[in-house]
Image (tube, helix red, strand yellow):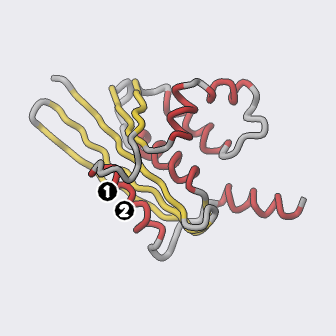
Amino acid sequence: MNKKIHIYTDGSSKGNPGPGGYGIFIETIIGSSYKRKIISEGFRYTTNNRMELLAVIVGLEKIEKKKQNIVVFTDSKYIVNTVQKKWIYKWENNNFLKKKNIDLWKRFLNIVHKQNIVFQWVKSHNNHYINDYCDRLSVEASRKNPLQIDYVYENQKKMNQVE
C-alpha cells in the first residue's frame, strides 16, 4: 500500500518573546484509509521561531515508525531555508556558533535523519485551510492556563541579562 504522511505545523508568539504556542495537524493516508492527529501546546515565554521549529520537531517525533515518507508543510522560511539550503549542516559543523535555538536545532537533527522528509513552504494567512487551522491552534494554545515553561529559553534570557 502507498502510505502518505503529511505534517502541517505553525507556531506563534505574542510579543516575540512572549506567550506562544504551536499547532500540528498530522494526516496519514493509506489507500482509502485516513487518520489524523491534532496537537497543540502553549508556553509562557518564548519566540515565534522557537514555536515554529518545535512544532516541526514534535510532529516528526510523533511518527514512531522510521524511514517513512513525510511531507512537512510550514509557513516558516526560517525552517525551510535552513533545511533546503543546507545551512543546518554548516551550523552543526561550526558548533552552532552565534546561532539561536541551538537546543531545538540539535533535537531536530536527532529526528530528521530517521525519516524521508520533504519540506514544503506554504504562504501564511493565504486561505490554506490546514495552515490557517494550525495558526488558530497555536494562538489558542498560547492563551491556555497553565502554560508550559520553555526552561532553556528562559534560562538563556536570564543568563544574558546578567552578562
Between 15 and 147, the one nearer to me in the picture: 15
* Image position of 66 (left or right of 32): right
Which residue is outermost to the bottom?
145
Point out the image quarter for the C terminus: bottom right
At label 2, the amino acid type is Arg
- Residue drawn at (12%, 38%) of the image: 33
Amino acid carrying label 1: it is Tyr
Label 1 packing within 10 angstroms: few (<14), some (14-19), many (20+): some
Q: Nearer the viewer, residue 85 or 95?
A: 85
The residue positioned 49% from the left and 25% from the top of the image is: 113
Residue extending furthest toward the front: 126
Q: Where, quadrant-wise, is the N terminus in this rendering? A: top left
**Where on the picture, by quarter, is residue 83?**
top right
In percent of width and height, residue 107 lies at 58, 39
* Residue drawn at x 9%, y 34% as measured from the top left: 32
- Quick check: 151 left or right of 19? right
Between 76 and 143, the one lying in front of the other is 76
Disc 2 designates what residue?
136
Helix, strand or loop at disc 1?
A: helix
**Position of 17 relative to 2 (above/below):** below
The span from disc 1 to disc 2 (Cα, nearest Å) is 5 Å
Q: Is residue 87 above or below residue 152?
A: above
Q: Residue 106: x percent and y percent?
A: 62, 37
Determine which of the numbered discs, if any, sits on residue 83 in the image: none
Do callouts 1 and 2 mark residues in contact (Cβ within 8 Å)? yes
Please give the label number shown on residue 133: 1
Residue 21 higher or lower than 80, as above or below: below
Image check: 15 left or right of 123?
right
Q: Position of residue 56 (x, y in %)?
A: 46, 43
Query: Is 44 rendered above or below residue 105?
Result: below
Residue 131 location in percent, x, y? 34, 50
Q: Residue at x 63, y 27 (%)?
A: 87
